[in-house]
Image (cartoon, helix red, strand yellow):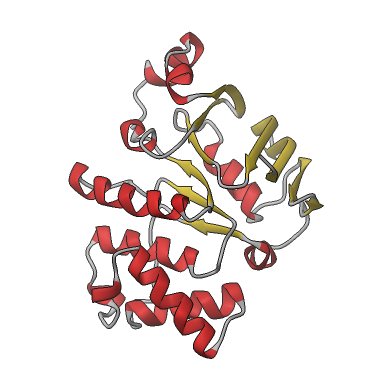
Amino acid sequence: MTVILDGRGLGMRYGDLQVLQGVDFTVSAGEAVGIVGPNGAGKTTLLNVLAGAVRPSAGTVSFRGRDITRTRPDQRCRMGVGRAFQVPRPFGGMTVLENVVVAAAYGAGLSGAAAHRRCIEVLDECGLAGLANRRAESLGLLHRKRLELARCLATGPDVVLLDEIGAGLTDAEAAELVTAIKQVRAGGTAIVWIEHIVHVLVQVVERLVCMDTGRVIADGEPQAVLGDAVVIDAYLGKATG
């Protein structure tokens, strides 16, 4: 498979605190990769670096062979790097459809009929078509999570970065979200998903990366990683909160 997002030797330091230490991380076209690890392992910092929210202290990030280490998040979004956050923050005074239109316009540069078509497709894919005219502030948590995913997809990403999008959901709600994410993957979009709910994560991903203290300590087939003694000691054997 063709590597589309590639981080090499990534380091991130805040004063004396080394959050990332020589991390290599790649994602291939259409691949679904999960990231696990204890709190403070550097997972979200890695996503921040890949998305461009922070610039690494060391190392490089490339997208489709182009160095984007110094490229802004909005520029990466236009290139095809989308992100959905753990805590959805939709524009509450707008409808569901209007929220997605904003994403299509500013994230993908679409307008008119092209933007409308993209938004209708995305709302249907995320199970929100029947709520298109609802104000975002009236949505429950599951539908806010779906809207967060829809706004990301409206930008037309080649790779989607998901940061604990399942957090706070019941098992039944998480199962619904998994169905939506599987549809995203079936469409050919690559996925990088940080999640503490491991049994949910492994329903989607084909590769699992475990981090601890800013390093990658395991990378491979999910069951093999979860059975690794180092991973069990670092992650599964600890309370993750």
Q: Residue furthest top?
A: 229
Q: Position of residue 3 (x, y in %)?
A: 69, 42
- Residue at the image position 56 percent from the left and 59 percent from the top: 82
Location of the N terminus by quadrant is top right
Q: Nearer the viewer, residue 78 or 29?
A: 29
Q: x, y (%) of residue 15? A: 69, 39
Quadrant position of residue 9: top right
Quadrant housing the C terminus? top left
Q: Nearer the viewer, residue 51 or 101?
A: 101
The correct choice, above or below, for 72 with respect to 96 in the image is above
**What is the x, y in percent for residue 209?**
54, 29
Residue 17, placed above or below residue 170: above
Residue drawn at x 29%, y 74% as measured from the top left:
129
Residue 143 locus on image (x, y percent): 27, 63
Which residue appears farthest toward the bottom when viewing the image?
112
In this rendering, position of residue 229 left or right of residue 138: right
Residue found at x 59% / y 74%: 108
